[in-house]
Image (cartoon, rainbow, N blue to C red):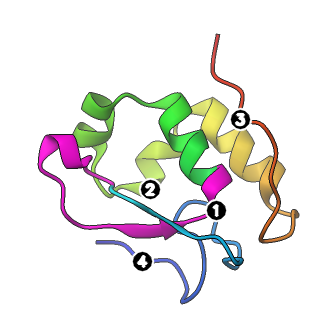
Amino acid sequence: MPTSPPNSCWLCERPLGRKVQQHHPVPKAKKGRATVPVHPICHRAIHANFTNAQLMRIGADRAALLEEEALARFVEWVADKPPDFHAPTRRPR
């Protein structure tokens, strides 16, 4: 499974803060077991943009997730935010 630098978010690669969630690149509902550490805001962004079926097909391919324009824009936007930054997550229309 691809890894990000130690103590950083798998999706945005920013340092992790006090709150860390474990994301299943292959959802548990689809028999996924492995997890990666992510910020809560990054975790919500992933699930706001992809269904479990899509995540199962993509698996642990972070680059494939970032091919989705909305998620790539999110990662670019959040890049300079502090580790514990929180904001509402918008769902695609």
Q: Gap between marks 1 and 4, in whole Å?
A: 12 Å
Q: Which label's residue is closer to the chain start, 1 or 4?
A: 4
Secondary element under disc 3, as helix, strand or loop, is loop
Nearer the observer, 19 or 59: 19
Extreme-bottom residue of the structure: 6
Residue assigned mark 3: 89
Say few, some or many: other residues with alpha carbon within 10 Å of mark 3 (under 14 / 14 to 19 / 20 or more).
some
Identify the residue at horizontal 62%, vertical 63% (top origin): 39
Residue assigned mark 4: 3
Secondary element under disc 4, as helix, strand or loop, is loop
- Verify CB contact (< 8 Å) between mark 3 and mark 2: no
Tag of residue 12: 1
Instruction: Describe residue 58's horizontal placement relative to residue 89 as left or right.
Output: left
Q: Which label's residue is closer to the chain start, 3 or 2?
A: 2
Say few, some or many: other residues with alpha carbon within 10 Å of mark 2 (under 14 / 14 to 19 / 20 or more).
some
List x then y, in percent, for residue 34. 24, 67
Q: Which residues are magenta?
A: 25-41
Tell me the mark number nearer the camera, choosing from 3 and 2. 3
